[in-house]
Image (tube, coloured by chain):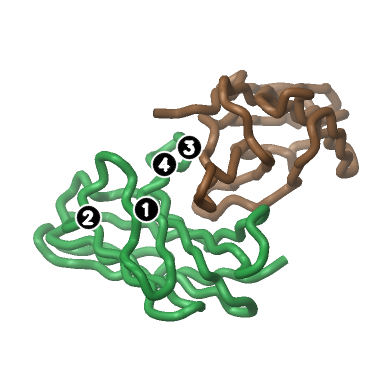
Amino acid sequence: GAVVSQHPSRVICKSGTSVKIECRSLDFQATTMFWYRQFPKQSLMLMATSNEGSKATYEQGVEKDKFLINHASLTLSTLTVTSAHPEDSSFYICSARYKTAFTEAFFGQGTRLTVV
Amino acid sequence: TQLLEQSPQFLSIQEGENLTVYCNSSSVFSSLQWYRQEPGEGPVLLVTVVTGGEVKKLKRLTFQFGDARKDSSLHITAAQPGDTGLYLCAGGPRSGTYKYIFGTGTRLKVLA
């Protein structure tokens, strides 16, 4: 399967600071990338859909000014958690789809964010 | 709002037992995927089913897509400790988008 790399895998930051998470498709072009949030022992909640060269589409209830998403190229999307607070601590996961196929998504390994 | 309900939520069984996990929705999906996720890692795709009534087998795992494409099941035969993990179904894509919606998840623990 295709490889999606997420970086960093773990990050601890102080309350009030911003954190950037990168999602890269290593061996394919991803027109669309998705960002998910996962609380302990729960399923994945879609936060936003990121399309290359355009603004991200956020799900209801997700603050777009707090979770900034940029999809600058066909292989890179970034999620920036701005002015992070302890309640933002979570597991964030990205996925990417092939440019020409919409039935399969490949996931990054996730980023564990802890805000102290 | 979760559109895909999985049952059971938790399952703890002995090695060698069989089990079935269900994924149900009131919505019709053009395809449905099953993933397995281990702690601290991203989900790994197991299978994609597209046709109503489709059955796919992956070694000891059997996946079925309902005739109406609203539900799916995952059956594991002779479970092994290595099958332990969080099983997630995902339905989609939503009309006009590439979005998949994830089910509520089933946490499986297989005891040796």
What whole-number distance in Å separates the C-alpha atoms at marks 2 and 1? 9 Å
- Residues at marks 3 and 4 touching, judged by CB atoms closer than 8 Å: yes
Q: Is residue B85 left or right of residue B81?
A: left
Mark 3 and 1 residues: CB-CB less than 8 Å, in contact?
A: no
Q: Which of marks 3 and 1 is in front?
A: 1
- Residue ID for mark 2: A64
Asked if B11 appears above or below A33 in the picture, the reply is: above
Please indicate whether residue A22 sits to the left or right of residue B35 in the image: left
Residues under labels 3 and 2: Cα distance?
21 Å
Residue in front for this viewpoint, A60 or B61: A60
In depth, the one of B43 and A72 nearer the eye is: A72
Tell which tag, 3 or 2, sits nearer the viewer: 2
> 10 Å neighbourhood of mark 4: few (<14), some, or many (≥20)?
many
Disc 3 target residue: A43
Residue B4's image quarter?
top right
Query: What whole-number distance in Å separates the C-alpha atoms at marks 3 and 1?
Result: 16 Å
The residue under label 1 is: A48
Q: In the figure, the green chain has which letter? A: A
**Residue lying at the far left of the rendered structure:** A16
Q: Are marks 2 and 1 in contact (CB under 8 Å)?
A: yes
Instruction: Estimate the spatial distance between the alpha carbons at disc 2 and disc 4, rounded to whole Å.
Output: 15 Å
Chain B drawn colour: brown
Viewer-closest of A6 and B66: B66
